Image (cartoon, rainbow, N blue to C red):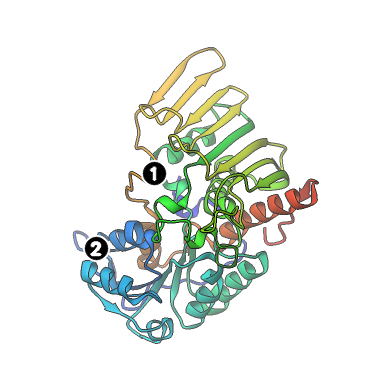
Amino acid sequence: MDLRISRKLGTKLLFVPAAGALPAKKGRRFVVVNVGIIGCGSITKFRHAPEYSSNKDANIAGFFDPQKERSLEMVQMYGGKAYESIEEMLTDKSVDAVSVCTANRFHASITIEALKAGKHVLCEKPMATSVEDAEKMIDAARESGKSLMVGHNQRLTDAHVKAKKILESGELGRIISFRTTFSHGGPESWSADKSSKTWFFNKKDAVMGSMGDLGIHKADLIRWLIGDEIVEVIASVLTLDKKGPQGELIEVDDNALCILRSKTGITGMLTVSWTNYGVEDNSTILYCSEGVMKIYGNPEFPLEIIWKNGEKAFYKIGSIQTNENQTKSGIIDLFIDSLVKGIPPAISGEDGLASLKIIFACMKSSAQGSSIRIDYPFI
């Protein structure tokens, strides 16, 4: 299946190739997309900047970060300009697209401003800190005719892509239930600040903790893998161990346990944690009518299948990214490819909104102590 079209479009948009794009010719490639990167923290340092730099159809026009030394560091490594402000970048007519790599609370406002300025946008997850802001982002993309893509990279890993194909083939029968988890020791070990002062622990900047950092990944992954929308949740979203600079518990969640039910009745568990002080766990199990699929639970064989009759299959396939092993995510290549070809983004604003609704429903469920139904008027 072509990942570029393997999702439901809530709103049909008109897309054209990025400004200055040249028609593809056999054996030739052109640098056609000038990109500005807003925010120069770890996600830019380890993913966006190196991945744009390695893409032959992309050129880094420059960087902006309120801490200018971070922008200058990126310019020294990858070239381009250290912009003095976001406005300067967005009014630069040579910039075709931007990556929004800031703290969560700035995602929506910067994205909307960029779309209105005529720029295509790749926004890091979570795309917004409220459902209403995410909807405004989608509206801005529709009104501007520009592309809005959200950086949900887990569906692009080798084992997840292979798992999706196997599930769609029907050989494992009907999906009955699932368990998906993402846990590690917390962002203070790899974020730009590398301390308990990280913005990830600040409710004003992050709004949500492990759910916005890790849960949003698994929410997007599971709805994509099962090919169905989550319509009901019940959850406990907790702060158990993480401490702030003064030794107090942080203002956002560091753990969550969530039960999700899909439109067709597929039911499973989504768990996330910033307090896994052992080996990072980023695994998923799908229990199907004809067998079980295990993904990223075995370092040697990232994809395993155990059929009902006892037969087994092991796939030695690409490993998943970890904080210690930063490999190419594929998100930047997918974004640039969509702009060059003038096609809708593979992971749309609507995808980002659907995943965000799951996260906020879980947080509401935890606060109210009851199950929460999710409405999907855009589908």
Q: Mark 2, residues whose alpha carbon is within 10 Å: few (<14), some, or many (≥20)?
A: some
Query: For this view, does 163 lie left or right of residue 89?
Result: right
For the point 47% across and 38% down, the residue is 277
Q: Residue furthest left?
A: 27
| Residue 30 visible at all | no
Secondary structure category for the residue under label 2: loop
Q: CA distance from mark 1 to mark 2?
A: 25 Å
Q: Quadrant of the N terminus?
A: top left
In this figure, which residue is indicated by the disc labeled 2?
Answer: 56
For the residue pair 257 and 187, the one nearer the viewer reads as: 187
State whether residue 105 is above or below residue 306. below
In this figure, which residue is indicated by the disc labeled 1?
Answer: 322
Question: Residue 355's x, y, as percent?
Answer: 60, 54
| Residue 199 visible at all | yes
Nearer the N terminus, badge 1 or badge 2?
2
Q: Amino acid at mark 1?
A: Thr
Q: Quadrant of residue 96?
A: bottom left
Query: For this view, does 165 lie left or right of residue 212?
Result: left
Secondary structure category for the residue under label 1: loop
In the rendered structure, are the residues bearing label 1 and label 2 in contact, judged by CB atoms less than 8 Å apart? no
For the point 32% across and 82% down, the residue is 94
Question: Residue 368's x, y, as percent?
Answer: 79, 51
Q: Mark 1, residues whose alpha carbon is within 10 Å: few (<14), some, or many (≥20)?
A: few
State whether residue 351 is above or below residue 81. above
For the point 61% across and 33% down, the residue is 178
For the point 59% across and 55% down, the residue is 250
